[in-house]
Image: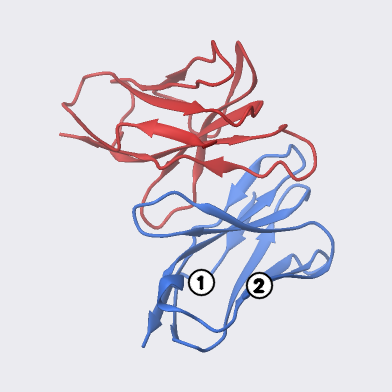
Chain colours: A blue, B red
Amino acid sequence: GQNIDQPTEMTATEGAIVQINCTYQTSGFNGLFWYQQHAGEAPTFLSYNVLDGLEEKGRFSSFLSRSKGYSYLLLKELQMKDSASYLCAVQDSNYQLIWGAGTKLIIKP
Amino acid sequence: DGGITQSPKYLFRKEGQNVTLSCEQNLNHDAMYWYRQDPGQGLRLIYYSQIVNDFQKGDIAEGYSVSREKKESFPLTVTSAQKNPTAFYLCASSMIAGEGTDTQYFGPGTRLTVL
């Protein structure tokens, strides 16, 4: 079967750095997406990785290792507004998105 | 402003009633999707459409129906056959399904509660 694993919840301190991991087992791979979702709102696109390596976008970076079926989202200089759920999704061989359950990130002052 | 709209934001219905959720986009996207989100679970695909007058079942299509008569619109009907319809429903769209970075963009969602 297809499976995406992420930690259910993480806690971090304002101003710190946090890494949210995602491991996947899917039938084929055509890219990995990270989305941010605030409570009660729609997911918003953060990043896309299809090749191995690190993609940096401001305070957020995303890393992919296809051989290990692994990705992480790195958030630097955490702000209170970063409190949200972070969703990992993999595009399979049919170009359908397989979604993880999301990681709820709690930021403490 | 370009975007995806869903209405209403909150919807209450009695058990046994059909209800239709609206989704409109003015992004000129070809593909549109309906997802359901339940607490503690990933998004689950209900239906998707890559072109007008054509749509495909997703993983959990039973008890739902859709239409795609216009490129901009993709309404979802939750029928009385859906066993557990209370959920947060999300509509999304993307440029071209099945190719490259067809990033999906989401509407604000409709929270349906069946009493």
Q: Local crowd at mark 2 within 10 Å, few (<14), some, or many (≥20)?
A: few
Chain of the residue that carries numbered disc 2 in the rendered image: A
Q: Amino acid at mark 1?
A: Pro
Q: Residue at x 59, y 82 (%)?
A: A76
Q: Residue at x 66, y 66 (%)?
A: A23
SS under mark 2? loop
Front: mark 1 or 2: 2
Q: Which residue is mark 2?
A: A58
Specify few, some or many for label 1: CA neighbours under 10 Å numbering under 14, 14-19, or 20 or more: some
* Image quarter hosting the C terminus of chain A: bottom left
Q: Are callouts 1 and 2 both on one chain?
A: yes
Give the vertical position of A13 relative to B65 (above or below). Answer: below
Q: Chain of mark 1?
A: A
Three-letter residue code for mark 2 = Gly
* Residue of label 1: A7
Residue A107's place in the image compared with A69, above or below, is below
Residue B91: x and y in percent read: 48, 35
Classify B99 as above or below A58.
above
State the image coordinates of residue B100 (x, y, percent, origin top left): 80, 43
Extreme-front residue of the structure: B1
